[in-house]
Image (cartoon, rainbow, N blue to C red):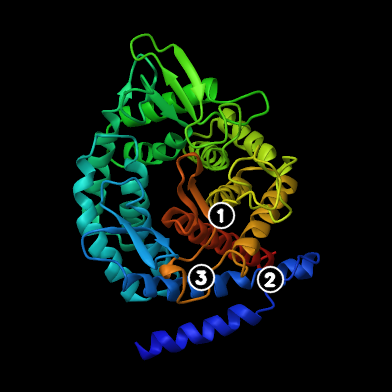
Amino acid sequence: MMKIALAVVILTISFLFSGFFRPDTGRSGRQNQDLFIDSALSRASIQYKVLIKQVPPEVMPRSYDAVNDLLLTSDTRWWTSGFYPGTLLYLYEYSGDTALLNEAGKRLAILEKEKHYTGNHDLGFMIFCSFGNALRITGNALYKEIILTAAESLSTRYRPAVRAIQSWEAGAHFHCPVIIDNMMNLELLCWASENGGNPRYWEIAVTHANTTLANHFRNDNSSWHVVDYDPLTGDVIRKMTWQGLADSSAWARGQSWGLYGFTMMYRFTRDPAYLEKAQSIAKFCLSHHNIPDNLIPFWDYDAPASPGTLHDASSAAIMASALIELSEYVRQKESRSYIDAARKILVSLSSAEYTAVPGTNGGFILRHSVGALPFNNEIDVPLTYADYYYVEALMRFKKNNDKRINEKKHK
């Protein structure tokens, strides 16, 4: 405990007085800024060791209520349940700290039962962000079987008439809803199909992506949040929002889900239509008239650009991670622009405005995320998926940077 407390003090001092967060000042400035990655990952590792001590054994952390100093948790069936162990695994991969790995193992043990869940589309978030990282990092073959089982469970939600995976159950508001978030869960199906699972998983993922491509996007390459279909005919009934400002608006996190999802689908398929859509979404986000200078979007791109409008750190973190991967698939000039945008986002998120002082924020890393503002739910709070995609983006940026350095050395 003394070592953790001392580390928190040291990191707090470095956080408050660090020079890593100065504005970009050209090539040398960018090289200096890249040093902030290790500082940010080290600080995140310490912060999650604070969080570890707050979380009860049979639940997952979800958010933090600062007013009441209360950790908000969920059961393992909640859609965010995979992000906490996933973040722990990324931080273990960076730091080698076995305390993080051990905690991840405990959380994977209570999460495993959700491999059979068929109640909605979120198994990719729940299982692949957690067990996918666990398999990649540890090589434990048992995790592969869990992932394959989860892929089969997710495949049961495919609706042939709609040519898509149904996101939520039908009810008073929907007949067969498909949300843009669902693009993220296709990674589970593609990976499973390539690693011993049913080839049908691949067909489902590609068909779903193509249906989304056809029906989810406006002419300006922004996306609707929800497209509701007739489950018998596959006809579109309505295009709308659920968590955004209005049916006609561009809900920020939805745009990031689409960017990430089509970038990921290009990784698996090399279909140029997916790459083109990812680049079009990136252009929409980065050149939008309402995007702030720090590239942390408002919770909805169409929300008023006023001092009282909330920014969403989770949307920014997802976008940064997606842009880093997208940079690998395009020409050098475009690649550089995506990396520079991702760097700017990560510098912003790693600043005192968005990153919590170690030991505060309930143990979460980032501040200022927005869950579902129209429902007054999770407003301007830390969120477990914001932390996950932030850490993933930091790790991706570090690997990208290390690769470029090695390439220069061998020229």
Type of the residue with mark 2: Phe
Q: Is residue 29 left or right of residue 328?
A: right
Check disc 1 and report the residue beneath it.
313
Type of the residue with mark 1: Ala
Place of residue 32 in the rendered image (x, y in percent of width and height, measured from the top left): 71, 73
Secondary structure of the residue carrying numbered label 2: loop
- Which class describes the residues within 10 Å of circle 1: few (<14), some (14-19), or many (20+)? many
Depth check: give the residue in front, 257 or 392.
257
Depth check: give the residue in front, 87 or 267.
87
Q: Earlier in the sequence, mark 3 or mark 2?
A: 2
Q: Is residue 224 above or below residue 319?
A: above
Type of the residue with mark 3: Leu
- Which class describes the residues within 10 Å of circle 3: few (<14), some (14-19), or many (20+)? many
Place of residue 221 in the rendered image (x, y in percent of width and height, measured from the top left): 64, 29
Q: Earlier in the sequence, mark 2 or mark 1?
A: 2
Depth check: give the residue in front, 362 or 222.
362
Can residue 210 be seen at all in this image of the molecule? no
Check disc 2 and report the residue beneath it.
21
Q: Which mark is residue 41?
A: 3
Cα–Cα span, label 3 and label 1: 17 Å
| Residue at left offset 39%, top offset 68% | 69
Secondary structure of the residue carrying numbered label 1: helix
Q: Is residue 128 left or right of residue 32?
A: left
| Residue at left offset 40%, top offset 84% | 4
